[in-house]
Image: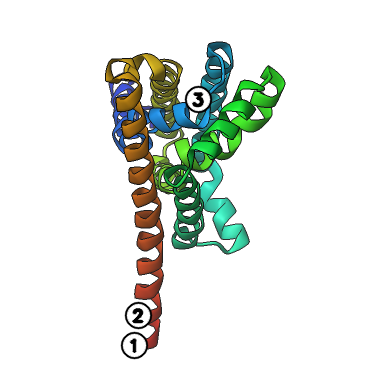
C-alpha cells in the first residue's frame, strides 16, 4: 500500500522534533562550552575553531552510529545499557574531578601544552575527552540508542522518512554545538576574568555531579535487576 506525501512529511517532521527534544537537552552545548574553553585554555582561536568543527562532526557520527547500530553492537558484546552508564559516568566524573582540583601549577602547565597545539594534534585529540565523554557522554549515547529503536517501522517509506528527520535533527544539533564551542570565549567575556574562572569551576563541579548521577543511574538499575533475579 502506497503512503501519501502528507504521512511521510509528518513522520519526517515528528522524528526531527523528537531527536531535538531527546538529544539536544542531554548534550546541552551551552553548559559544556565552558568546559571546552577550560580544557583548551591557551589555544589560539584558529585551533579552537578547528576543535569545535571536529567535535561537532564527531558528535554527529557517534550519535548517528548509536542510533543505527548501537543496540546491535551492545547485544553482540553482551553489554547492557546500565554497564555503559557506569563506565561512561566514571570517565566523566574522573575528568571533571581533575578540572575541579586543578591547581595554578596544573593550569599553567595545561595552558602551555594547549598553546603548543598544532592543527594536526588538535585533529588527533578532538575525540577524547572533548567529544567523548565531555560533549557526548554515555547518557546521550543511551538516548540515541533509544531513539534508534523508536525509529524502526514496518513500512520502508515511514522508516526512511523517520531516518531523514533524525539525520536533520542531528545536523541542527551539531550546528548548535559548533556555535556554542566556537564562540564560548565571547559568551563568557562579559563575566570578566574572575567571573569566568568561577563559572568554569562551577561548570566543572556540575559536570562531576552529572558523572556521579550517570554512575548512580546505571548502578541502581543493575541493583534492581539483581534484586529481581534473587526474588524469583
- Image side of residue 215 versus residue 46, left or right: left
Secondary structure found at label 2: helix
* Quadrant of the image occupied by residue 185: top left
Give the residue displayed 69% in from the left and 25% down from the top.
121
Can residue 131 be seen here? The reply is no
Secondary structure found at label 1: loop
Give the residue displayed 40% in from the left and 40% down from the top.
151
Q: Nearer the viewer, residue 62 or 185?
A: 185
* Quadrant of the image occupied by residue 187: top left
In the rendered image, the vertical position of residue 205 relative to residue 124, given as above or below: below
Tell me residue 122's x, y (percent). 64, 24
The reply to whether discs 1 and 2 touch (Cβ–Cβ < 8 Å) is: yes
In 3D space, how far apart are the residues under numbered discs 1 and 2 (Cα atoms)?
Answer: 5 Å
Answer few, some or many: residues within 10 Å of disc 3's Cα (few below 14, many 20 plus, some between 14 and 19). many
Answer few, some or many: residues within 10 Å of disc 2's Cα (few below 14, many 20 plus, some between 14 and 19). few
Answer few, some or many: residues within 10 Å of disc 1's Cα (few below 14, many 20 plus, some between 14 and 19). few
Q: Mark 2 points at which residue?
A: 228
Can residue 148 be seen here? The reply is yes
Secondary structure found at label 3: helix
Tell me residue 173's x, y (percent). 39, 25
In 3D space, how far apart are the residues under numbered discs 3 and 1 (Cα atoms)?
Answer: 46 Å
Give the residue displayed 55% in from the left and 56% down from the top.
74
Q: Mark 3 points at which residue?
A: 56
* Quadrant of the image occupied by residue 194: top left
The reply to whether discs 3 and 1 touch (Cβ–Cβ < 8 Å) is: no
Q: Nearer the viewer, residue 5 or 201?
A: 201
Q: Quadrant of the N terminus?
A: top left
Give the residue displayed 61% in from the left and 21% down from the top.
115
Q: Name the residue under label 1.
A: 231
Amino acid at each position: 500500500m502506497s503512503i501519501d506525501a502528507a504521512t511521510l512529511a509528518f513522520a519526517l517532521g515528528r522524528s526531527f522534533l523528537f531527536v531535538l527534544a531527546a538529544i539536544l537537552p542531554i548534550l546541552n552545548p551551552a553548559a559544556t562550552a565552558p568546559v571546552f574553553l577550560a580544557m583548551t585554555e591557551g589555544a589560539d582561536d584558529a585551533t579552537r575553531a578547528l576543535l569545535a568543527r571536529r567535535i561537532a562532526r564527531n558528535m554527529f557520527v557517534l550519535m548517528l552510529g548509536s542510533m543505527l547500530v548501537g543496540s546491535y553492537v551492545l547485544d553482540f558484546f553482551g553489554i547492557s545499557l546500565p554497564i555503559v552508564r557506569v563506565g561512561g559516568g566514571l570517565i566523566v566524573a574522573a575528568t571533571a574531578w581533575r578540572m575541579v582540583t586543578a591547581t595554578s601549577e596544573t593550569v599553567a602547565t595545561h595552558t602551555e601544552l594547549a598553546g603548543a597545539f598544532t592543527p594536526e594534534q588538535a585533529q588527533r585529540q578532538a575525540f577524547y575527552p572533548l567529544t567523548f565523554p565531555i560533549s557526548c557522554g554515555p547518557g546521550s549515547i543511551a538516548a540515541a540508542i533509544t531513539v534508534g529503536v523508536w525509529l524502526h517501522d514496518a513500512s520502508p517509506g515511514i522508516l526512511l522518512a523517520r531516518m531523514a528527520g533524525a539525520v536533520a535533527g542531528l545536523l541542527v544539533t551539531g550546528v548548535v554545538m559548533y556555535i556554542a564551542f566556537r564562540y564560548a570565549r565571547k559568551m563568557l567575556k562579559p563575566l570578566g576574568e574572575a567571573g569566568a574562572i568561577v563559572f568554569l569551576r562551577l561548570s566543572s563541579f556540575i559536570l562531576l555531579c552529572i558523572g556521579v548521577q550517570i554512575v548512580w543511574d546505571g548502578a541502581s538499575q543493575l541493583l534492581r535487576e539483581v534484586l529481581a533475579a534473587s526474588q524469583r
